[in-house]
Image (cartoon, rainbow, N blue to C red):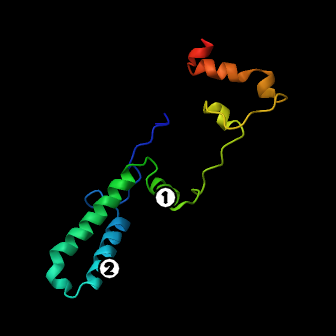
Amino acid sequence: MDSGDVIPCLNEDWTFAGCKLMEWMAGLTMALMVGASLHKPANAMPFLVLIMIGTTLVIAMMRKRFPDEERGVRNLCMVNLGFEPIGIPAPSKLQPVWSGAPVRELSGKSLFRQLELEKVINKGFGDPANR
């Protein structure tokens, strides 16, 4: 099966209710942190159990949204914190031209301009002005 499709959740080792061990541990940690801040945690036990299960399921749902699972969650968190994700290369010099929204102009001496490849690319993507 090398069609390029990614099957979500294919590489899971062990799950309980669709959640991995680390997600259950994160839920337990969250329940312990909230319980430590309460005066009488035994009185709020149903609330703490809901926090544990809710945190676990939310983390698992967020992980399953991405085809590459943990890496997708990591990249989402890093982007929200303002960091560049690890392992994603910077855009190439031709990226603005390929995306159809040039950010800067290429020099007229470049081979890309001499071969007039921007016309070919625009035709290939259905630019109505070049039809």
Where's residue 106, x and y in %?
76, 33
Task: Judge whether 125 appears above or below 93 on screen.
Answer: above
Amino acid type indicated by mark 1: Asn
Taking the image as shown, residue 103 lies to the left or right of residue 51, namely: right
- Write down the quadrant of residue 120 in the picture: top right
| Mark 2 / mark 1, whichever is N-terminal | 2
- As measured in the structure, the alpha-carbon distance from the residue carrying label 2 to the one carrying label 1 is 24 Å
The structure residue drawn at horizontal position 47% and vertical position 55%, both measured from the top left corner, is 76
Q: Is residue 15 visible?
A: no
Query: Mark 1 = which residue?
Result: 80
Q: Is residue 88 visible?
A: yes
Between residue 29 and residue 10, name the one nearer to us.
Answer: 29
- SS under mark 1: helix
Which circle marks residue 70 in the picture? none
Where's residue 122, x and y in %?
62, 21
- Write down the quadrant of residue 59 in the picture: bottom left
The structure residue drawn at horizontal position 46% and vertical position 50%, both measured from the top left corner, is 68
Q: How many numbered badges does the structure rendering display?
A: 2
